[in-house]
Image (cartoon, grey):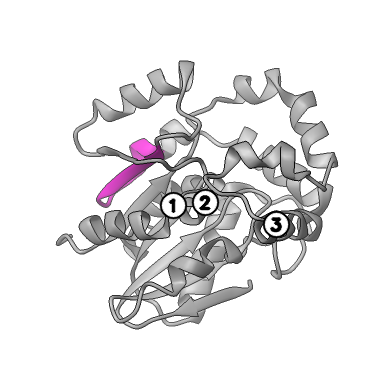
């Protein structure tokens, strides 16, 4: 697994979105200073990590993160992930609770297998079109730049259609609601004000918020890609939560 690391202090694991890479955290890694030893991992099949050798479930991906933590000598860390990285954060808080001080789950859609089945053709088409235009992408970011568009397309091409679809299959097979119930450490849900929470998804988030043990915080003027739109605001939420006693 490829990783980027920065800073010294509280161990902090960072997990990217589907089709992304550790480079989603470049700006945040510059901010951590002496507060955190921040380590961003590329999922297997993404970025500069090894390609997929077989189908991996999200549970398999969480096991790979646990192995990578052991290889780095990290006995325990706060884990933040966004989108599919958020699902992995939830899994780490249950399946690998002994390795987690806190888990922070960012912009992870509370979708079901039926949701994915109903939109599968659209998902397949999206995973087959590896190059996105500026016009098609600009609504998904607060401030899309040519450099960000270039990185987006590089990351998608590195993963390729096979890895993107394999990861979507893993998500389709994943029971996010059960994973949330299984979390054994302090957990926080983060949403972007301009993210994906609308309609039925918003109602499902409201149901999750009724659980007082897992609060939901909304980041102002932020979309789905929290670490890219506003790394400073994200870090302030990480600070407020990760530095609480466990």
- Estimate the x, y position of residue 38 in percent, counting from the top left: 42, 73
Instruction: Return the residue nearer the eye: 209 or 234.
Output: 234
Of marks 3 and 1, the one in the foreground: 3
Q: CA distance from mark 1 to mark 2?
A: 6 Å
Q: CA distance from mark 3 to mark 2?
A: 25 Å
In the visual, does 93 lie left or right of 194?
Answer: left
Quadrant of the rendered image containing residue 242: bottom left
Numbered circle sitting on residue 85: 2
Instruction: Return the residue nearer the eye: 67 or 163.
Output: 163
Return the residue found at the far left. Answer: 245
Of marks 3 and 2, the one in the foreground: 3
Q: Is residue 64 above or below residue 195?
A: below
- Estimate the x, y position of residue 64 in percent, counting from the top left: 57, 64
- For label 2, the SS is helix
Determine if the magenta segment contains residue 186.
yes
Dot 2 alpha-carbon crowd within 10 angstroms: few under 14, some 14 to 19, many 20 or more? many
Identified at 62% across, 19% down, the residue is 114
Which numbered disc, 3 or 2, marks the residue that appears first in the sequence?
A: 2
- The residue labelled by disc 1 is 89
Identified at 74% across, 47% down, the residue is 164
In the visual, does 243 lie left or right of 32?
Answer: left
- Residues at discs 3 and 2 in contact (Cβ within 8 Å): no
**Magenta-highlighted residues:** 180-192
In the visual, does 202 lie left or right of 153?
Answer: left
Instruction: Return the residue nearer the eye: 135 or 223.
Output: 135
- For label 3, the SS is helix
- Residues at discs 1 and 2 in contact (Cβ within 8 Å): yes
Which numbered disc, 3 or 1, marks the residue that appears first in the sequence?
A: 1
Numbered circle sitting on residue 146: 3
Dot 3 alpha-carbon crowd within 10 angstroms: few under 14, some 14 to 19, many 20 or more? few
- For label 1, the SS is helix
- Estimate the x, y position of residue 108 in percent, counting from the top left: 48, 39
């Amino acid at each position: 697994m490829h990783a980027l690391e920065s800073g010294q202090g509280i161990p902090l694991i960072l997990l990217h979105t589907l089709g992304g890479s550790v480079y989603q955290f470049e700006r945040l890694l510059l901010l951590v200073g002496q507060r955190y030893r921040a380590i961003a991992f590329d999922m297997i099949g993404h970025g500069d990590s090894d390609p997929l050798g077989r189908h991996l479930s999200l549970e398999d991906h969480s096991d790979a993160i646990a192995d990578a933590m052991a290889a780095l000598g990290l006995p325990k860390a706060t884990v933040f992930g966004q989108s599919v990285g958020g699902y992995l954060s939830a899994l780490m808080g249950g399946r690998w609770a002994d390795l987690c001080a806190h888990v922070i789950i960012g912009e992870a859609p509370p979708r079901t297998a039926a949701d994915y089945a109903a939109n599968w053709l659209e998902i397949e088409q999206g995973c087959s079109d590896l190059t996105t235009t500026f016009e098609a992408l600009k609504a998904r970011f607060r401030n899309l730049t040519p450099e960000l568009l270039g990185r987006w397309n590089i990351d998608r091409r590195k993963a390729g259609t096979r890895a993107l679809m394999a990861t979507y299959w893993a998500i389709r097979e994943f029971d996010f609601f059960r994973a949330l119930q299984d979390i054994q450490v302090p957990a926080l849900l983060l949403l972007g004000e301009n993210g994906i929470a609308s309609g039925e998804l918003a109602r499902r988030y409201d149901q999750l918020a009724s659980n007082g043990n897992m609060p939901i915080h909304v980041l102002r003027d932020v979309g789905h890609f929290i670490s890219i739109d506003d790394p400073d605001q994200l870090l302030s939420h990480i600070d407020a939560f990760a530095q609480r006693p466990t």
